[in-house]
Structure formats: C-alpha cells, structure tokens
C-alpha cells in the first residue's frame, strides 16, 4: 500500500543500509526536491548529513534566512551557509549574454560546492534531489541529443571529479509523491508548493548585465508580487509567477518632480509540463494592487507591465 508514511519508512531503511556510517553531503537550494531529500536524509541518518547552501546573491527576498530557519533552526539539520554573493557578482560583471551568464553561475556554483565539500571529512556520498521526470529527461537527452535551448543547471560531472557516489532517494518518484512525502516529513506547506525557481535565479530575471542594485530592486518588487498572489489565493492556482527586471528607464512624475526610473515586468503562467504555457489571467483588480504597491514601495521602479506572451514562442523566463 502506497502511503507517504510507508514509503518514508522504506526509504529510511534503504538509505541507512546504503550509506552505513559514511558522511553524506547535499547541495540544498530550498527548492522542493532538495528540501525533501534534506528532510528525509535527516530522518534517516541525522548528523551524518551535511547540507551546503550557497547564497549566490541571486536569491529572492529573505530566501537564505528562510532556508536556515526551516532546516537549521527548526529541524536541527546541519547546514553550511556559504555567503558567495560577491564572488558571483564579480564573475558576472560586464556579462550580458544569457547563456554566458548561465555558464558562469553554474560553474561558480560547482567551484564553491567543491571547495566546501572538500572540507567535509570522509564524505563518501553526494545526495541529489533527482526525481523520476529528471531521469526520463536526461535519458531522452542522451539518446536523442535533444536540441538544447537553454543549458540547465546540472552537476553531472561532479561525482566522478570528487570521487564520491551518488545518493538519489527520490529517483522513482513523481512530483506529487515528493510533495506528499515532504508534508509527511513536516516541511512547511509553502515550501512544498513553491513554484519552480531556476538554478541561475535572479541572474536570468535581470535582463543583460547583473548588478546588485538591480537585484535589490527586483527582490522587493518580486516579494510584493508573490505576497499579493498569496493574499488573493492565486499563488497555487498559477504554475509559476515572478517579476523580471528591465534595465530600461522610463519617465514618471512623482509628486512635483520628474523621475526617470526602471521598469519591472510581471510574468505568470499556467502549464502542465513547462514545455508549453499560457499566460495566466490574473484579475485586473489584483494586477492593479500589485502595480500600485510596487510603484509606491519600491523607489527606483516607476512602471510595471504585464507579460501576455504564450510559450511557444516566448519562454517562461525572459532569458
Ligand atoms: P523556460 O524559460 O525555458 O523555462 O520556458 C521552463 C522552466 O524551466 C525553468 N528554467 C530553468 N531551471 N536552470 C533551471 O534550473 C535554468 O537555467 C533554467 N531556465 C529555465 C523555468 O523557471 C521554468 O520553470
């Protein structure tokens, strides 16, 4: 009988049998899959698990603190938080091309992860939140040499380089099963039903060159957007929603003064598989509230636009 409780019990047993007394490391992103792996491994092997959480400066508002709060404080999971914002930002300086940005962010992530992993003595296992659809997707990519539109985050070469074995306890599960297990393990509902967030983070939501100033503005606007979607009970009806920073300036009048400020675009899509998507029909009243709040509360942004492009051809992310 498939119940979350049973499957957790059997996964806990098999993880214990597999790793014995070895140390395990896990790159924790705060996304659904790696979070569920962290909670599961914590239950199975407790202090033999060390999570590495890399703050690349491209996370959403308070995201790093929330990850530490949930895992380190509440659950007692061993988490190393690596503050690498400056390294990422300086590596990205002057780079505007989306694919180059992705490569730099992915490469830097691996570099930092390896450095941290090397400090953990006797680490023999690298845990990953691979789920069944990922297994299918990478098998398809291998046989068909699928046309790569965007190079997605992957740490494929890492295990051999680090001389470490892969531990993928969610390999046979679908997303909804992973969520049910996460809930059973006591992870917060909001974390389990979070929209996907790309590995390169705000790096691909700030068009062109990434600057700290832009990231700070985008974080504030994005937080207001998501807060209003939650407040209006829309967040979980939408597949993915986020703000995009446009590094162009437009004219505004603020009080008696003329301002010349940046623009933010709101993206929201409904999709089953993320391969095709429709733009979400958020009610005008809600869009109005979001736009007013962003313009009033985020100094430096004076114009908000709504993205009404379907995929194809427009990808969900703008880069
Ligand atoms: P696109 O923009 O290709 O996005 O329509 C489809 C889904 O994939 C996510 N995405 C990424 N995820 N690394 C990731 O881990 C990436 O480089 C990346 N690019 C897009 C996107 O957020 C959406 O859910």
Image: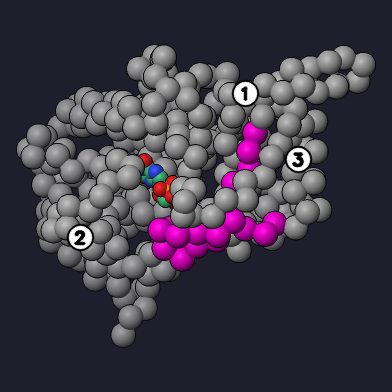
Which type of secondary structure does the marked residue at label 1 adopt?
Answer: strand
Q: Position of residue 309 (x, y in %)?
A: 57, 51
Name the residue nearer the viewer: 30 or 220: 220
Say left or right for 294 vs 40.
right
Which type of secondary structure does the marked residue at label 2 adopt?
Answer: helix
Q: Residue 248's mark?
A: 1
**Is residue 276 a member of the stretch shown in magenta?**
yes
Say left or right for 232 vs 61.
right
Say left or right for 194 vs 129.
right
Q: In the picture, which quadrant includes the N terminus?
A: bottom left
Name the residue nearer the viewer: 181 or 244: 244
Q: Residue 37's mark?
A: none
Instruction: Read off the residue under disc 3.
Output: 291
- Please say whether residue 54 is visible from this viewpoint: no
Determine which quarter of the picture holds residue 12.
Answer: bottom left
Name the residue nearer the viewer: 191 or 308: 308
Picture residue at 41% right of the left edge, 15% below the top: 93
Instruction: Read off the residue under disc 2.
Output: 140
Picture residue at 51% right of the left edge, 29% below the top: 207
Q: Position of residue 136 (x, y in %)?
A: 23, 63
Disc 2 residue: CB within 8 Å of ligand 1: no
Picture residue at 52% right of the left edge, 30% below the top: 206
Q: Could you tell which of marks 1 and 2 lies nearer the N-terminus?
A: 2
Q: Could you tell which of marks 1 and 3 lies nearer the N-terminus?
A: 1
């Amino acid at each position: 009988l498939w119940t979350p409780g049973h499957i957790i019990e059997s996964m806990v047993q098999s993880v214990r049998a597999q790793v014995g007394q070895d140390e395990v490391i896990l790159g924790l992103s705060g996304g659904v899959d790696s979070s569920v792996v962290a909670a599961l491994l914590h239950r199975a092997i407790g202090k033999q698990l060390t999570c590495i959480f890399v703050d690349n400066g491209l996370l959403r508002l308070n995201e790093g603190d929330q990850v530490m709060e949930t895992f380190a404080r509440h659950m007692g999971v061993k988490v190393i938080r690596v503050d690498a914002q400056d390294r990422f930002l300086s590596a990205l300086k002057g780079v505007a091309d989306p694919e180059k940005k992705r490569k730099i962010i992915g490469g830097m992530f691996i570099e930092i992860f390896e450095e941290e992993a090397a400090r953990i003595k006797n680490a023999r296992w690298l845990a990953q939140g691979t789920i069944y659809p990922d297994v299918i997707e990478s098998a398809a990519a291998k046989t068909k040499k699928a046309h790569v539109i965007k190079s997605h985050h992957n740490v494929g070469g890492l295990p051999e380089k680090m001389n470490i074995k892969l531990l993928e306890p969610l390999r046979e599960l679908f997303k909804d099963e992973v969520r049910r297990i996460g809930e059973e393990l006591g992870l917060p509902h909001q974390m389990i039903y979070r929209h996907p967030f790309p590995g390169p983070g705000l790096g691909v939501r700030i068009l062109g060159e990434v600057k700290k100033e832009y990231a700070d503005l985008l974080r504030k606007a994005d937080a207001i957007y998501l807060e209003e979607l939650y407040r209006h009970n829309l967040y979980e009806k939408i597949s993915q929603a986020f703000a995009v920073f446009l590094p162009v300036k437009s004219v505004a009048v603020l009080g008696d003064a003329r301002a010349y400020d940046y623009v933010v675009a709101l993206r929201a899509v409904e999709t089953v598989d993320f391969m095709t998507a429709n733009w979400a029909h958020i009610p005008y009243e809600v869009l109005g509230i979001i736009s007013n709040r962003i313009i009033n509360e985020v100094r430096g942004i004076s114009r908000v636009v709504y993205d009404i492009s379907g995929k194809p051809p427009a990808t969900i992310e703008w880069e």
